[in-house]
Image (cartoon, rainbow, N blue to C red):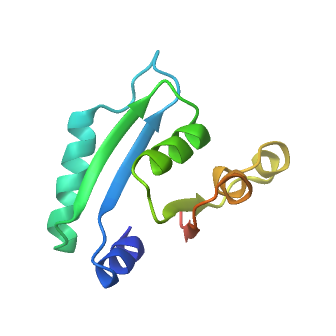
């Protein structure tokens, strides 16, 4: 996230941390946790232009694209983790699907697991 913050800071942009819950039968995340994470990121990065949004009951890729359109986003940034071979063979990653199905510039960052 530090790389995304550095990029946002260079353009004095707002950074929105978007979390989407696909399966609402088991809520793994609530707004309190997301807001706490946002506050921690703001404090550690010393960058105040960070907000958070929690969406649920939507497919992740559709939710990202719909929200990006709603707020007229200039860019989407996602992290890409190394996945086991079996998962790579049978499931395309979110970042690869987004690369083919979004009309907004996409920044994909590789992360260590």
Residue projecting furthest to the top? 25
Question: At which x and y percent is residue 63?
Answer: 52, 38
On screen, residue 100 versus residue 107, left or right, reads right
Residue at 63%, 58% (x, y): give it. 103
Residue at 29%, 65% (x, y): give it. 14
Residue at 71%, 57% (x, y): give it. 96
On screen, residue 22 versus residue 50, left or right, reads right
Q: Determine whether 78 is above or below 86 in the image.
A: below
Question: At which x and y percent is residue 84?
Answer: 73, 52
Question: At which x and y percent is residue 35?
Answer: 21, 44
Residue 80: which quarter of the image? bottom right
In the depicted view, which residue is nearer to us: 33 or 74? 74
In the depicted view, which residue is nearer to us: 22 or 103? 103
Which corner quadrant holds the N terminus? bottom left
On screen, residue 6 versus residue 32, left or right, reads right
Q: Determine whether 113 is above or below 58 in the image.
A: below
Question: At which x and y percent is residue 42?
Answer: 19, 64
Residue 15: which quarter of the image? bottom left
Residue at 47%, 15% (x, y): give it. 25
Residue projecting furthest to the right? 89
How many numbered dots are placed on residues in this image?
0
On screen, residue 55 versus residue 61, left or right, reads left
């Amino acid at each position: 996230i530090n790389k995304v913050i550095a990029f946002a800071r260079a353009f004095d942009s707002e950074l929105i941390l978007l979390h989407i819950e696909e399966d609402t039968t088991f809520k793994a995340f609530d707004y309190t946790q997301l807001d706490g994470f946002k506050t921690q990121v703001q404090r550690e990065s010393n960058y105040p232009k960070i907000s958070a949004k929690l969406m649920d009951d939507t497919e992740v890729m559709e939710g990202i694209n719909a929200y990006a359109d709603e707020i007229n986003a200039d860019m989407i940034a996602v992290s890409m983790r190394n996945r086991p071979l079996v998962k790579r063979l049978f499931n395309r990653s979110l970042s690869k699907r987004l690369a083919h199905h979004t009309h907004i510039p996409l920044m994909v960052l590789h992360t260590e697991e």
